[in-house]
Image (cartoon, rainbow, N blue to C red):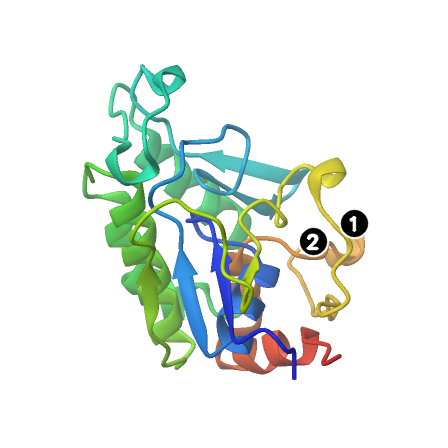
Amino acid sequence: MTHHASILLSTAYFAPVRYFSKLVTYPEIFIEQHEHFIKQTYRNRAVILGANGSIPLIVPIEKGREQKIKIKDLRIAHDEEWQRNHWRTIFSAYNSSPFFEYYADDLEPFFRKKPNFLLDFNQQITDTILELLEISIRINLTESFEQVPEYCLNFREKISPKPHRNVDDTTFKAQPYTQVFSEKFGFVPDLSILDLLFNEGPSAHSVILDCIRRI
């Protein structure tokens, strides 16, 4: 078991498998809500696998993001029908997966509503995914933006969709599972939790646990 008792993460939109492995590893979870928004991160994007390869799904945010808006105050933009486009892309990628129909009714509502704040929206999604995985944990929001305590592992910037921004993580090793386009691309690791959920269904929780390396 790691010597850290808690972990600090950024918010994330349909987070990758590695993110969920942290949620089930640490007894105390903190999500940063006072940081300023950072572009090109999982805060407002997820990566799934389609017929032509990896596909980023990006949640648009309101203009003014350069004005150092705290993540808790960051509003989602609705100038375009991004929800409909995201769901169409997800449907196209996973409608033939073994468990798409099993979970579609639980997830499609997220693409019908028009949420106001990114943080709230992401938390609702994460809570729903945890329920579907039958994982019972408590997630805390930070009270302020400050130096991370010694007992808390700071992982706010260490899980990134940009390979050059990722850091070596000795506590995580992606475990292969059958993906819709495995024959075309081989196994693509650490995609959005959606990929694991639609392909593995109730076994997704076990796959996450198998990815965890104790040091």
Residue occupying image coordinates x 35% and y 67%:
139
Disc 2 crowd rating (10 Å Cα; few below 14, some 14-19, many 20+) is: some
Q: Are marks 2 and 1 in contact (CB under 8 Å)?
A: yes
Identify which amino acid the numbered label 2 is placed on: Phe
Measured as percent of width and height from the top left, residue 11 is found at: 41, 49
Identify which amino acid the numbered label 1 is placed on: Phe
Residue occupying image coordinates x 19% and y 43%:
113
Measured as percent of width and height from the top left, residue 75 is found at: 25, 30
User: Quadrant of residue 127 in the image?
Assistant: bottom left
Question: Would you name the residue on which mark 2 appears?
Answer: 181
Q: Is residue 32 left or right of residue 15?
A: left
Report how far apart the C-alphas of labels 2 and 1 lie in the structure.
6 Å
Residue occupying image coordinates x 72% and y 70%:
171
Foreground: 120 or 192? 120
Question: Would you name the residue on which mark 1 appears?
Answer: 185
Is any part of residue 96 visible from this angle?
no
Above or below, 27 relative to 29: below
Foreground: 77 or 120? 120
Residue occupying image coordinates x 54% and y 37%:
41
